[in-house]
Image (cartoon, rainbow, N blue to C red):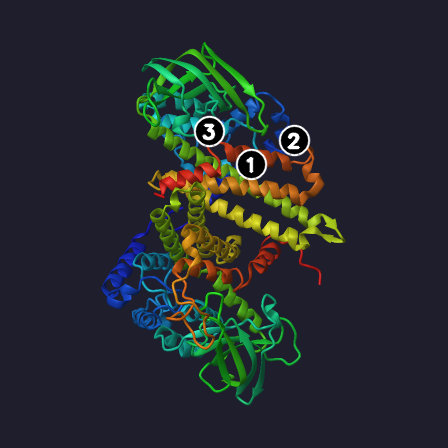
Amino acid sequence: MNFAFTEEQDQLREAVRRFMETKSDEKEVRRLMETTEGYDSALWAQMANELGLQSLHIPEEYGGQGFTFIELGIVLEEMGRALLCSPYFSTVGLAVNAILNAGSADQKAALLPGIAAGETIATLAFTEPNGRWDADGITMEAKGSGDSVTLDGTKMYVIDGHIANTVVVVARQAGTTGEAGIGFYVVDGDAAGLTRTPLATMDQTRKQAKLEFSGVKATALGDSSNGWAALSKTLDQAAVCLANEMVGGAQMVLDMSVEYAKVRVQFGRPIGSFQAIKHKCADMLLEVESAKSAAYYAAWAAAEDNDELPVVASLAKAYCSDAYFHATAENIQIHGGIGFTWEHPAHLYFKRAKSSEILLGDATYHRELLAQRIGI
Amino acid sequence: MDFTDSPVEAAFRVEIKEWLSENLKGEFAELGGRGGPADEHGWDIRIAWEKLLGKDRWLGLTWPIEYGGRNASFSEQIIFSEEYALANAPARVSFFGEGLFAPTLLAYGTDEQKRRFLPKIQSVEELWCQGYSEPDAGSDLANVQTKGVRDGDQWIVNGQKVWTTLAHRAQWCFCITRTEPDSQGHRGLSYLLIPMDQPGVEVRPLVQITGTAEFNEVFFTDARTDTANVLGEVGDGWKVAMATLGFERGTAFLSQQLAFVRELEEIITLAQSNGAATNPIIRAELADSYVGVQIMKYNGLRMLTSLVKSGVLGPEASIGKLYWSSWHRTLGERAMRVMGTAAILIDSAPGVPSSDEHGSGSRAYDLNELQRIFMFSRSETIYAGSSEIQRNIIGERVLGLPREPK
């Protein structure tokens, strides 16, 4: 029994943290969040070339490094801490896993090396205007099969959908309902008939787009008649990724709160000496540490690809969503008036926490999913 | 990260599994896992069972071999706790002796003291109780007033302790005593080991909101103990007492977490049979309790790993007590909602509990298991450092926030 990171994993964390501190400081986050693209293409290339971040958990046979979800979790945690504005979660946390779970060997060989090299941005177009995260929410129908599929309909809330070179689309075969007939389809970002509209997001550090398909030609990814299991697994893996990203942000706002509570003086003493503030910080620590335990354990289960994954994915998503949001909300309260200003970074984390909480289903959604998964 | 057994660990798992299947029979098996360190359900059977555990050195698992232990690693302790809970073996009765006093004795005792006390803990001939809290020393524990005065080669002790769990069952008490007259706060305290069976010690049951009396008041009136029975230096008792609290807050979570899992399973089973599980709010609450109890395990495993690696407890250790006591209190409240209207009634004749008896035998005001969790858990956010004290400790010692000005 050993619940700790290895020395190599600690070194990876150190390297990524240093990189993020210089490449994604607050000034840079604010610069990028005001752009439509929402990322820096030169930094995207650097992330691939200098640190090999995009190729981390892609198997070596497809141009990757063959690491696991544990290493991926570490990288995402550090990105979450720095609020990195980048299509990393959409490309590596969503699209890569979808391709690995659903694609044939030939398709993986065709799609993954470009992602690993930092040449391709990819995403998963799953959610629709109904905003649902379950199988019934998928109404877009795919006509045809294999290489000659046509897609019509609208996808919403597509993370980085406006800049993705490759879009993995989830659609269903005509006449199917629920978990039957779900399939993955690959579309080029600039395909004919695809209209992409950037959306104004409450959390400006993670961009989304609306994708309207009008007779768009697509290729089925693997067996497109029976893809629910692959999609469910992809969503579980993505939830684990997001949970790890969230704990990075949660630790960051805890650090901000504690630091401020030590230096801000009112009534002639630091506010952190008042129990009202001290106890808030203690509760934040309890939740942040617990969120870490959940996220790290879930990363281990994803790395092992064991039977525990569905349960711990929902468990981690539910707990980390609540813990991150609570920490960012308390961070504003502890900072008082200054924490309510646009100028202070507290709102950037507050908004990222809320959007991350909702993405892939909020805590309420995952508690119900968990209830079903443990047989209640 | 690796949550699978190494070959050595796997062999250890087989050993305890086999021992349990050979020994957990008859009345021991019938008793099941009910009860707890402060619950006297099936007491005599549990004492007999504990003696079996001691005889084969499952009691004293972590002690050095030279003192009769197995020198078990943390992984082996986890495996033992898992298999013990899986087998639904009786709740342990030696928590205060084995769980709290023995680790303190091993850290601060002389070789002579270890050889005097450890074997009797293992043979279950001597049970221990904890003499910490007093009427005016609750959260402010350093305010203890119980006095010890030297008389030749003995200490004479006068004062009152309260909330003393199982004092009526114990042969010995480890007791924070003020041995320097007029000293204040942390200074001038000694950690005395006092025999309970003597005229100067009177134990009175303290009936709780549960109607039972696992806690007691203990009155010392010219009680005596030999000067050899001081753990650590005279006047240095605070340090020793805090070490004990460290054990209480640290490693005792293991078997407890598994007992909590069992309680939650019982509540879920009830919710499924009485229809409560169709209510979406109840479903969300039960799922949330499941999340909480699993994270309790993950937190514990992280804490133990960091302890093994670095030898020091990390910040996740200090959150343990606050975490489990809050979780359990919420579970009790949720259990009442799952019971529904049936929670209003208790399964006994009308009446009030008498104040002259101990234990949870047949008596008025007999609660069922879920009602007991609901009631008893109110004590858990108070004893062993209240939740408010825990938050002060976390704020000041872990996060480095300034202390309250005096």
Residue B154 sits above or below residue B5 on the image:
below
Position of B401 with respect to B75 (left or right) is right
Which residue is at a point 71% across and 63% down the rendered structure image? Answer: B406
The percent coordinates of residue B344 (x first, y second) are 44, 57
* Dot 1 and dot 3 residues touching (CB under 8 Å): no
Q: If you read the primary sequence from the N terminus, does the residue marked by circle 3 or circle 2 appear first? A: 2
Q: Dot 2 corresponds to which residue?
A: A27
Select label 1 or label 2 by which is in front. 1
Q: Residue A54 carries which label?
A: 3
- Which of discs 1 and 3 lies nearer the camera? The answer is 1
Towards the viewer: A225 or A163: A225
Q: Which amino acid does label 3 sit on?
A: Gln
**Nearer the N terminus, badge 1 or badge 2?**
2
Q: Is residue A234 left or right of residue A323?
A: left
The residue that appears at 53% across and 46% down in the rendered structure is: A288
- Helix, strand or loop status at disc 2: helix
Residue A126, relative to residue A294: is it above or below? above
Q: Quadrant of residue A108?
A: top left
Residue type, label 1: Ala
What amino acid is at disc 2? Lys
